[in-house]
Each structure stands twice: as structure tokens, then as C-alpha cells.
Amino acid sequence: MNEAVFRAVEEAGWIAPLIFILLHVFRPILLLPVVVFYIAGGYLFGIFYGTLYTLIGLALMSAVFYAIVNVIPSARHYLSRVKRRVFGDRQMSLGQVNILRMMPFIHFQVLSLYLIEMTSSFKEYMRYSVAGVILPTITYTSFGGFITTMPWYATLTFFAVLAIIFFWFGQKDDPEEDELNRILAKAGF
């Protein structure tokens, strides 16, 4: 399934970027992990355009997701159940959600649900959602092939570092003082 989808994009010519961006919107329905799209973007379009198209696709997917969970209560209820099964009743900071977005195969929509619950408006949700996928998009689009071919111990080390950072962000007493919030504010997000 994955190969057929990406082969169709590769053979689409000038319309390929549009198809790739739209596939991001339908990615959750196709049950494809987001990391596959990060890596495929770099493979199909190169680092710069792969990153750009992936960011646009993830922004559109985030906007559609926001609308779906606010219009279809059963979708929100289902994802809330998944969230409880995966994370229990754990409250996370914005930094922790964004660190988890760096880890492949973590349920992207559950993390987006956390963002919806943390924010007070669509604009704020989109700001944090887009800002939170910039680093993973650049990382996996640029180094996707390298990361997937790393020896198992290097891969474990990479994810151990991410886990340490995840827990470090969780040690903040005041969510308003979260380091990521300050960085985003300085950057104009």
C-alpha cells in the first residue's frame, strides 16, 4: 500500500506536490505513520521542497483535524479513549507534546488532541501545531534515510536523548514558564 501511494506521487509530474500535500490530510484515514511522509518528502522532492510540502500538508491536516474533533463528538471521544489508554491521565506540557512529535510512531492525532485541550482558540492551536512540527519535519526529511539506517544502538541513543528532554520539560512547575513558550514568543509565533 505504502509503495503504491508514493509511486503514484512520484509519477504524477508537476501535480505531485499537490497530491503529496493532500495525502497528508488523508494520511490518518490511510493509517500511514507521519514519519513515512517526512522521509518520503525528502526522497521525492529533496530536502527544501520536501520540508516545505510536508509543513503545508501537516498544517492543513491539523486544521482539518481541529474541525473534525469539534464537529464530530464521536471522533473526539474515540481519540480521548486512545489518549487515556496510551498516556493514562498524564498531563503534558507543550514542550513534552512537541518532543513526542519527534518520536516516530507516536499517535499524531492524540498529540494534536493534547494541543487542542491546551489551547484556547483555533489560532493558538494552529500556531503551536505548526511550530511543533517544524523541527521533526526538518530532521526526518533531511536525515530520514540516515536515521532509518543507523545501527540499533545509535537509534536507541537518539530516542533516549528525546526521552530525557521529554521528562525535563515535564519538570516545569509553571506551564506559562515553559521554555518552548518563551522561544515561540520570541520567534513571533
Image (cartoon, rainbow, N blue to C red):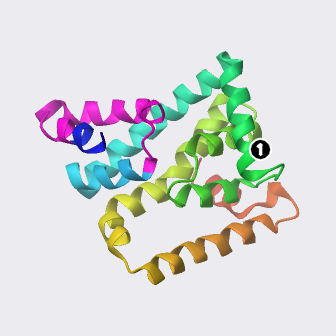
Q: Count of labels shown?
A: 1
Where 147 sits versus 123, above or below?
below
Residue 109 or 53: which is nearer the viewer? 109
Locate residue 67, reporting x and y percent. 60, 22
Residue found at the far top of this picture? 71
The residue identified by callout 1 is 84
Magenta: main secondary structure equals: helix
Q: Tell me the quarter of the picture where residue 177 sits.
A: bottom right
As for residue 75 lying within the magenta part, the answer is no
Q: Tell me the quarter of the picture where residue 20 sits.
A: top left
For label 1, the crowd category at 10 Å Cα-Cα, with few meaning under 14, some 14 to 19 and many 20 or more, is few
Identified at 82% across, 66% down, the residue is: 172
- Left or right relative to 178: residue 112: left
- Left or right relative to 37: residue 47: left
Identified at 18% across, 41% down, the residue is: 7
Identified at 46% across, 31% down, the residue is: 60
Q: Secondary structure at mark 1?
A: helix
Classify the position of the N terminus by image quarter. top left
Q: In this picture, which residue range is highlighted in magenta?
A: 7-34
Residue 188 or 93: which is nearer the viewer? 93
Q: Tell me the quarter of the picture where residue 137 sits.
A: bottom left
Locate residue 133, reporting x and y percent. 51, 51
Residue found at the far right of this picture? 173
Give the residue type that dot 1 points to. Arg
Residue 67 or 145: which is nearer the viewer? 145
Locate residue 139, reporting x and y percent. 41, 63
Where 13 sits versus 182, above or below?
above
